[in-house]
Image: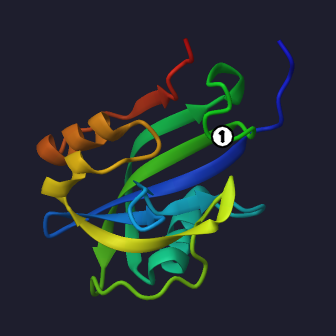
Amino acid sequence: MAMTKSHRVSARAVVIHQNKLLLNEFGGGLYYNLPGGGVEAGELIKEAILREVMEETGLKVEVGKMLYVLEYEPVYCDNLHGETPRICIAFECTLKGDANIKTPTVPDKNPDNPAIISKPVWMPVENLKNIEYVPYIHNNLMAFIETGVFEPSFLSEPLSN
């Protein structure tokens, strides 16, 4: 097996407020993901979450407990989400201050199509079952929202057949 590039580390925030989940909407609803992004050199993971949430939504959060680590290795997934291997660490976060989303200063972009940019939204929890969520952890996230229980987990993108 050929060696791949070094892993990119990213951090994501799971923010639930008044029965709504903070998400980035891409392409007018083509798909959604949690706010967050790459950890920069010299930055702590929790600092990256604070920065990314502020850049993408204009909101302030407090970082709480770790929920999951998600590994993506393109070799095993037919390059489902591009060629860069990633480790994503997600944390439960609590909103600090008001919940009024601001225009992103640094919107997320689809790495395969930079013309598709994100728009932050508060998605009602009851609508989550009807959306396309990337990455595939949708069922784990729904279980956490419904029960409030998400034991720290190690997940990986599904292997290709």
Q: In this view, does 124 lie above or below 72?
A: below
In the displayed structure, would residue 30 be above or below residue 25?
above
- Quarter of the image for residue 38 reads bottom right
* Place of residue 15 in the rendered image (x, y in percent of width and height, measured from the top left): 31, 63
**Which residue is drawn at the image coordinates 40% and 31% (left, top)?**
153
- Name the residue located 13 percent from the left edge and 41 percent from the top edge: 147
**For residue 2, above or below residue 29:** above
Instruction: Please determine whether, in this image, residue 17 is positioned above or below residue 80.
Output: below
Q: Would residue 26 appear left or right of 2 to someone viewing this image?
A: left
**Disc 1 target residue:** 86
Residue at the outermost right position? 2
The answer to which quarter of the image holds residue 2 is: top right
Q: Give the colour scheme of this rendering.
A: rainbow
Image spot of residue 69 (x, y percent): 49, 37
Residue drawn 30% across and 74% down? 95
Quarter of the figure with residue 143: top left
Q: Few, some or many C-alpha atoms within 10 Å of disc 1 (few <14, some 14-19, many ≥20)?
A: many
- Of 146 and 126, nearer the camera is 126
